[in-house]
Image: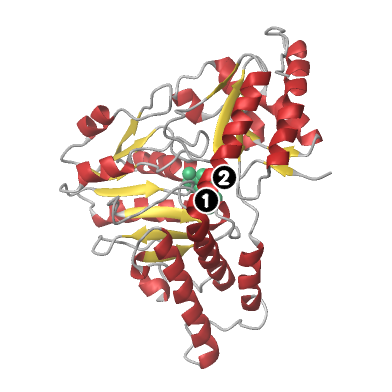
Amino acid sequence: MNVVYLDNNATTRPAPEVLDAMNPFLTDCYGNPSSMHTFGGQVHRRIEEAREHVARLINADPGEIIFTSCGTESDNTALMSAVESNPRKRHIITTRVEHPAVLNFCHHLGRKGHRITYLPVDSRGLLDMNLFRKSVDEDTALVSIMYANNETGVIFPVGEIADFLADRDILFHTDAVQAVGKIPVDVRMTKVDMLSLSGHKIHAPKGIGALYVRKGTRFYPYLIGGHQEHSRRAGTENVASIIGLGKAAELALAHLEEERLSVSRRRDRLEQGLLACCPNAGVNGDSGSRLPNTTNISFEYIEGEAILLRLDEHGICASSGSACSSGSLEPSHVLRAMGIPYTGVHGSIRFSLSRYTTGDEIERVIAIMPGIVKELRQLSPFGRDTITCPK
Ligand code: PLP
């Protein structure tokens, strides 16, 4: 059975071009980039080329890119650096809908005595900018607000936040793990101080990420040791994965616009097809400001896990906003922050597409899903209804 992979916000398939680019660095070109000899030096040069590609994707300077092991490390590094570099200030502003890589680090800092403001979102997953502006005070050291939400795809007004913070002595970090490579991200236009990205969300392998740090930003390394990455991130480089990330960034930039359009067309077709066939279903998150590849749909009165299991029997991979399927026993903190009713949170499914998603795959999901919903609703203690499919 061919797998229909619609879980690209969890991770993506490594692009064949990426694997080809990496291969020599897993076989013949194994020199240490810090070595004095030519064998190591040539690897060093290729790392710098990869850095240029990553920088170009977000319109940064190569010197502003630090390679890390993942998005989580980039997020943790940014937050830690911000509090270390300004110990007198103790206030951090973030949102209730961040990824745990930011949220749990904020909880950690809260336990250490920092004051954390967790901004709410409305029922469409949008921030109240007035509330944001009011929450900034003299003691604010850092604002960390994501570029786009991993569960709903909702995009935050990062440029507006950056403009507001520009003349204040407050660092602004954005977790752009889900945004980079899917929508244009330009750190010259959107003046963030730090930005996190992750390789495995853009068709590079797992275990590689990057942190953008604007030139002149106070920075404290998280990993301390050797002089790699200009002493900003110690540890011998994950060479092959860095090369892979460079190639993935090059591909993402070259095809950004065309992929944004083709992926969003498929996503919209999926969404419309499912909403037309399944009563009591609705999209979570603002449709006007959303990543092109993501849709989060609540199928009320059924358990998301049950849907996922049925989809899995058909070789369809998606994820749910509730319980065990997302690796946690809690229902989605994002949907709860949006005030989605219990029945909606528990019946929510995230479909996330990629450049490899085909129209046939989308039609297969649209054909299969109504039967699954009908069957599960009949089993549901909450109610039964019928499924009507347009001809
Ligand atoms: N931030 C966001 C918004 C994410 O979606 C993820 C992963 O899902 C991360 C951070 C963590 O990235 P990584 O898996 O590379 O640690």
Q: Is residue 18 or residue 364 the one in the foreground?
A: 364
Asked whether mark 1 lies closer than 8 Å to ligand 1, one says: no
Front in this rendered view, residue 164 or 143? 164
Amino acid tagged 2: Ser
* Amino acid residing under circle 1: Glu
**Can residue 181 be spotted in the picture?**
no
Seen from this angle, which residue lies furthest front?
Answer: 391
Position of 300 relative to 73 (above/below): above
Could you say whether the residue bearing mark 2 is in a helix, strand or loop?
helix
- Name the residue at 64% across, 35% down: 319
Residue 193 locus on image (x, y percent): 29, 54
Q: Is residue 382 visible?
A: yes
Q: How far from the left and from the top, in percent, is residue 296? A: 56, 30
Residue 42, position as x, y percentages in the image: 51, 85
How many residues crowd mark 1 within 10 Å: few (<14), some (14–19), many (20+)? few
The quarter in which the N terminus is drawn is top right
Vertical placement of 37 versus 160: above or below?
below
Label 1: element kind? helix
Q: Quadrant of residue 372?
A: top right
Up/down of 235 relative to 356, above or below: below
Residue depicted at 21% across the width and 41% down the height = 164
* Quarter of the rendering containing residue 350: top right
| Label of residue 36 in the image | none
Residue beneath disc 1? 258
Report the residue at 74% width, 38% height from top.
316
Which residue matches tag 2?
Answer: 262
The C terminus - image quarter: top right
Label 1 to label 2, Cα distance in Å?
6 Å
Are circles 1 and 2 on residues that touch, CB within 8 Å?
yes
Residue at the bottom extreme? Answer: 37
Horizontal relation, residue 341 to residue 369: left or right: left
